[in-house]
Image: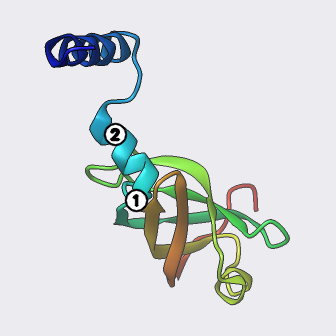
Amino acid sequence: MPRPKLICALIGLAAIIVLAGGPSPRAARVAQSGQGQQTKTQRYVLTGTVQSIDVPNHQVVVDGDAVPGYMDAMSMPYSVPDEKALKALTVGDVIRADIVEQGDDAHLENIKVTGHVKPKGQ
């Protein structure tokens, strides 16, 4: 095949891949090299009240205040990998902690008890 036809064929093939939604040549190189796999770690400060503790599953439910730039005030479960920190908590503890987010994973670190409130219903 003469060179001009080969170039046209390659351009046509690239256009088909792009139009079909296939990976761009750069994306293919990144995927092959393993780059782009790293996710950025973000940290946010959470303040709130412990609602429940699930030691076997390493989780705590916190009625949290709004975290500017991250989420509104809400009650939700958080993973706590540090079992010692988790066991030190009690329902009603007012805490300050770091939400550590990396990719799809988020967990609490640096948990500090700043007060205690009587849980509702007691």
In this view, 5 is above or below 112: above
The image's mark for residue 39 is 1
Distance from label 1 to label 2 (Cα)? 16 Å
Q: Position of residue 73 (x, y in %)?
A: 42, 47
Q: Are marks 1 and 2 in contact (CB under 8 Å)?
A: no
Q: Position of residue 16 (x, y in %)?
A: 34, 10
Numbered disc 2: secondary structure: helix
Q: Look at the image and tell me in which quarter the N terminus lies.
A: top left
The answer to which quarter of the image holds residue 11 is top left
Q: Look at the image and tell me in which quarter the C terminus lies.
A: bottom right
Q: Position of residue 19 (x, y in %)?
A: 33, 10
Instruction: Give the number of callouts.
Output: 2
**Residue with the mark numbered 2:** 27
Please report whichever mark, 1 or 2, sits nearer to the chain's N-terminal start.
2
State left or right for residue 63 relative to residue 6.
Answer: right
Picture residue at 33% right of the left edge, 14% below the top = 13
